[in-house]
Image (tube, rainbow, N blue to C red):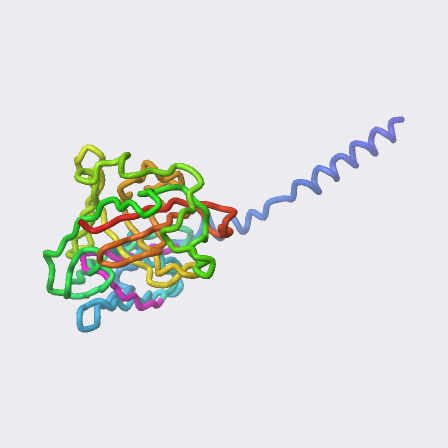
Amino acid sequence: MKKLKLFIAAAALVSFMACNPIEDLSLREQYVVKAGTPITSAELTSALTVAQEGATNDIVTLKNNRTDVGGAWHVGTAMGETIIKNDQYTYVYESNGNFEIYYVGMSEGKIVESAHFPITVTDVYDPWAGMLTGAKSNTDKSAKKTWSWREVSWGSICNMGAHGGWKYASAGYTPESNFAWWANFTLADVDVTKEKMVFEYDGSKMTTYGPDGSVAAQGTFGFIKTSPEEAVLGTWVTTAPLIGARFDDCGQGSNNKFYLLTFTDKFITIYHNGWDGSADWDDCGWYAYFEAQ
């Protein structure tokens, strides 16, 4: 019996050791305790190249000359911050404004942030921004334009509806067709004289006014001019919620990327999807219809 107890105890010890491997303290010492002295912010900044080029200073060449310090560029744009994980990159601005670029790297196990490089873009003309703001050229700095709700032919200003219906033009569907499943609103639910959006060309600025006519939010806007799905013109990105965000069950605030289904200097139709990979007719999003005032 005594031998049996000793055998069970030994087996338990072996089992415990097998489930709990001994930590290699030499690795902890090498990479954490004695990792070395990290690069300073000033040293990292001096190793970076941020150069504006182009006829309108819209092209910015980025280079990290300390490739041993891995990390990412943080590029400020009218659409918010863009993260670029390349040591060398050329970024082209499509919006005017004052921005900042900086680099965040990892050195000897420590996060190090560079100084912020100021970027000023003043003479770019984006025709999409022109349609939104009324600007006719890159010198039209004072251009601004007001937009509010538009009621489409079947009686909606916004609604939650089926994903992807706009793709089926051969079946008679258009971006303004009735895809509504729920949360359908009409002009009777809003006051277009108070609830509106004002977009300014200079600085790509936006201001929205709530149902009582007071300022609801301020931010900036920009565009991604590639089609994310069939029959989508591009993506409209804002740093502040649009009017009607209270009707949008997908939620706005940190997720302000809207499919442009119709986009002219008079009419805008958007679709806001709350997630990626939605299936046509199975999933849904928020449709909203606007017109210039």
Q: Quadrant of residue 124?
A: bottom left
Q: Residue furthest top?
A: 1
Residue 290 magenta: no
Q: Nearer the viewer, residue 231 or 155?
A: 155
Q: Is residue 90 magenta?
A: yes
Q: Report x, y in % for residue 144.
A: 14, 53
**Residue 76 image-quadrant placement:** bottom left
Which region shows up in magenta?
88-106
- Tell me the quarter of the picture where residue 65 sits: bottom left
User: Can you say which quadrant of the picture contains the N terminus?
Assistant: top right
Give the camera-side residue of 269 and 155.
155
Query: What residue appears at the point 17 percent right and 49 percent down from the top-left corner?
Result: 293
Which residue is painted at 39% across and 38% down in the image?
249
Against 30, residue 68 (above or below) is below
Q: What type of secondary structure mainly makes up the magenta span?
A: strand
Position of 1 with respect to 288 (left or right) is: right
Q: Residue at x 36, y 51 (%)?
A: 176
Q: Is residue 42 visible?
A: no
In the rendered image of this protein, does residue 54 appear above or below residue 188? below
